[in-house]
Image (cartoon, rainbow, N blue to C red):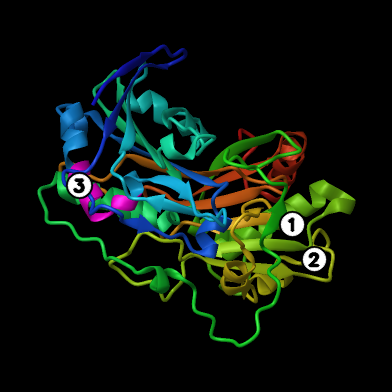
Amino acid sequence: MGRVQEEGSGPVHGFRLSTVSASQPSETGTTHEPTGLDLAMKLHYLKAVYIYSAETARDLTVMHVKTPLFSVFDQIPCIIGRFRRHDSGRPYIKCNDCGTRFVESHCDLTVEEWLHVPDRSVDEALVYHQSVGPELAFSPLLYIQMTRFSCGGLALGLSWAHVMGDPFSLSHFFNLWAQAFAGEKIYSPKTSDTERVCQNPNSTVKKPNSIKRVDPVGDLWVAPNNSKMTTFSFNSTVNDLKSHFPANGDDEFKILAGIIWKCVATARGESAPVTITVIRLDPKELKPRAVRNGQMISSVHVDFSVAEASLEEIVKAIGEARDERFGIDDIVDDVSDFIVYGANLTFVDMSEVDFYEAKVMGKSPESVYCNVQGIGDDGAVVVLPGVVEEERVVTVTLPEDEIEKVKWEMKKCGLITPLV
């Protein structure tokens, strides 16, 4: 566990890096073969931040946080492996126990001061992120940053290579850590390479609209962008949505997606999107979760003007989204590179992810943030659960030159307040 001291600036500083691995070595020759759906995600990353109060975390040391990771990595060794390529060029994970990077840092603010900022995208400063590559054999797939606030509170930030698994997998991993921390026996189901491939119930597969082929990136897995992307977030409640934006009793995610799609369409004018991507939990995915990409990826295409359509018409169209996972699994080959998030304007429903089950000393986090790194030029909207059951945290990532126009449309329709 060698340490490297790095300098930082701003309220978060004093970075120290070390490595954490499993307590038991993996069997020699163990590998993990990504599916086509996994590889479609290889240019995307998940950034998650769990913030705990001083009352909960004041007495937690670095070793208190690190020690439960050993048993979690014993259960899921691919997380601490490294990528290699077959002769065909197809990437696979060699389960060689190289470990994850663990980063210690300090924040000059208290938890209360940090959470006072309404825009939760500031939490990304609490995530140490490095993309996979250019040397695959030396690139960790997971970074964990432990930030101590001045009051004694704690933030645990994760940078997670999406090629390993979806947001529900990330949450499953962190919940296992919390269970191991509490002294509980943990279990993560093992899945074979065959089981992780999406099984197509239909004999024909249509070409998916939710995925976009990009120019080859080689061994540096970074999504290309023509625009500079920027992010902001705001809070909403289920009651406010359903009372101010009635749409035949549909769920709040579809209502939010419909409102924001309409706002983006109005802001973009002639280039308004008529095709969007919707990413949600597959209702067939049951607990206990395994680490995999099992999220449902669907596309919606309309032949009407979204800017001029009624909310009910838009929400109805979203409800008819077509699952395209089988097509994605089929179209991804050994060497091509793709993006999913931001290939179209993408709406991601994480409201059912059980982030707040990660209890420390019996207490849930004060706040949880999660977003996607590597979003394409069409942008993405992520809907998270709030601390209160009725609350939703909405994170919007769009090209910098259109973000203020979209905010203005959101204010005009009453989705956000003038202060955002």
Q: Which of marks 1 and 3 is nearer the N terminus?
A: 3
User: Residue 43's x, y, as percent?
Assistant: 57, 46
Query: From this viewpoint, is residue 21 visible?
Result: yes
Asked whether 22 falls inside the magenta stretch, the response is no
Q: Give the range drawn in magenta.
A: 69-78
Confirm whether residue 354 shows in the render.
no
Q: Position of residue 147 (x, y in %)?
A: 32, 26
Residue 78 locus on image (x, y percent): 34, 52
For this view, does 196 lie left or right of residue 314? left
Direction front: furthest residue: 87
Q: Residue at 59%, 42% (x, y): give it.
A: 374
In terms of depth relative to the viewer, which is nearer, 404 or 196?
Answer: 196
For disc 2, the neighbor class at 10 Å (few under 14, some 14 to 19, many from 20) is: few
Give me the residue at 71% from left, 39% from top: 225
Query: Circle 3 sits in a helix, a strand or a loop, which is it?
Result: loop
Residue 148 appears left or right of 279: left
User: What secondary structure characterizes most of the magenta part?
Assistant: helix
Tell me the distance, in whole angstroms, between the alpha carbons under discs 3 and 2.
Answer: 58 Å
Say few, some or many: other residues with alpha carbon within 10 Å of mark 1 (under 14 / 14 to 19 / 20 or more).
many
Q: Name the residue under label 3.
A: 25
Q: Any mark on residue 262, and which?
A: 1
**Amino acid at circle 1:** Lys
Residue identifier under label 2: 309
Give left or right: position of 407 versus 177.
right
User: Which corner quadrant holds the C terminus?
Assistant: top right
Query: Based on the displayed image, in which of its 4 quarters is residue 313 positioned?
Result: bottom right
Q: Which residue lies furthest to the bottom in this view?
A: 203
Q: Which of 204 and 246 is in front in this view?
A: 204
Query: Per the image, is 70 magenta?
Result: yes
